[in-house]
Amino acid sequence: MSFNTLNLHSDLLKAIAACGFDQPTDVQREAIPVILSGRDLMASAQTGTGKTAAFVLPALQRLLNAAPNRGRGPRVLVLTPTRELAMQVNDNIRQFSRFSRFVTGTVVGGMPYPPQMKMLRNPLDLLVATPGRLMDHMEQGRVDFSRLEMLVLDEADRMLDMGFVDAVKTIAMAMPKARQTLLFSATLEGEVLKIAKQILNDPVRVQLAANHERHASIDQHVHRADHVDHKHDLLAYYASHASVSQAVIFTATKRGADRLSRKLLAEGHASAALHGDMSQSQRKRTVDSMRRGKVRLLVATDVAARGLDIKGISHVINFDMPMVAEDYIHRIGRTGRAGAKGTAISLVGPDDQRKLAGVQRLTGSGLNWTVVEGLEPTSPEPQRGRPRPAKGKGRSFGKKPGGQYQAKPRSADGKPKHKAGQRQRKFGGKEGKARFPSHSALS
């Protein structure tokens, strides 16, 4: 199936060809005809699947027709959870509208108000916005929705997780009821379904795959860590491995991202942090540096990494497990994009078991427990709901061939003989360099 069969305007087909695309992705093939028919849509799709083009192309097709109502406000509004994703959507709009003439703009936080105010005073075809900043302008009476025809909620689950439920409802209520509404989300359940029932009208549902069937191109592995020092040892192993061309390492906090990035820099790795306390210009410079290959290891928080689209990310490493299980899906989606292979590594400490259980329930699969020789955990293996050890991935946590568990060396008080941060390693070659055979997710 080619894009020519989707009944798109010749100017759009010309732009698609100029971008090097010849066949639509699954979400584009399913969603575009529905949107062109005028029906509301709720779709389960993630970044890396071509979902942005799935709504941008039919939105531009609509704009090629004359506006039914006169006015200066936007005919199409795209709501995104973060500035980075808004910029990414805007880039797609520019690519696909290169042979057409549209007036587009962005309204996002962290940017000066005056240019946005000037833009909103002039005729506008398509607006990409984040809920918080758009609400600021709406409260001052600067936004005209009288001729709005289409509302797109991109990554709706993340917007709701970030606390924009009321803002999304308020924005939707300010628009004509006759509009077309499109909702894209990694998951179509819970709060997302509630909001969909309130603001969508008899939507067509497109769910390309169950959660456990997604990311088939990503190898997902879990390491059990005794404590945070053990996590650092495992991270050091992967950070030094030749197969890791570029990686995004996720932490739970902004301070944690800064600390971990500084530690990796001190160990000789090209690393940088990405989080919400950085200015927009700082974040842009960091992302550009990674795109140019100057940064190999990007340590990020969930919010900062949303919308991050960089080719060549070979690994995603969860140094801290996500608080919300759905964020696991968004995290690992940074790798294995556009048909490429990727690897996701999760470091699970004693306090992460409940978070891991939530991920397993969401994905519907038992993730592969993996060990690195010399960095084996010494704490007991979880007995309920645990993933099975990956076959061929080294020793199965001290099991004997007959299935009996072999106790690790311990002192009289029952604690492991090694102290925190002093792993039992086999050394070879230069002093201080651990010998790590290929018994890991990298083998």
Image: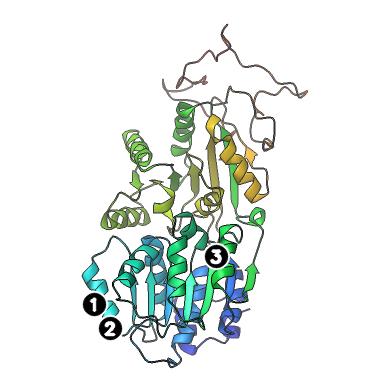
Mark number displayed over residue 118: 1
Looking at the image, the residue that sits furthest to the left is 114
Amino acid on which the number 3 mark rests in the picture: Ile
Amino acid on which the number 2 mark rests in the picture: Asn
**Residue 286 place in picture, x, y as percent:** 32, 52
**SS at circle 1:** helix
In which image quadrant can residue 299 be found?
top left
**SS at circle 2:** loop
Task: Decide if residue 234 is on the left or right side of residue 392.
Answer: left
Q: Are marks 1 and 2 in contact (CB under 8 Å)?
A: yes
- Which circle's residue, 3 or 2, is located before the other in the chain? 2
Foreground pick, 399 / 189: 189
**Residue 395 place in picture, x, y as percent:** 65, 28
**SS at circle 3:** helix
**Residue at screen point 62% across, 41% down:** 357
Foreground pick, 53 / 361: 361
The CA distance from mark 3 to mark 1 is 32 Å
In which image quadrant can residue 105 be found?
bottom left
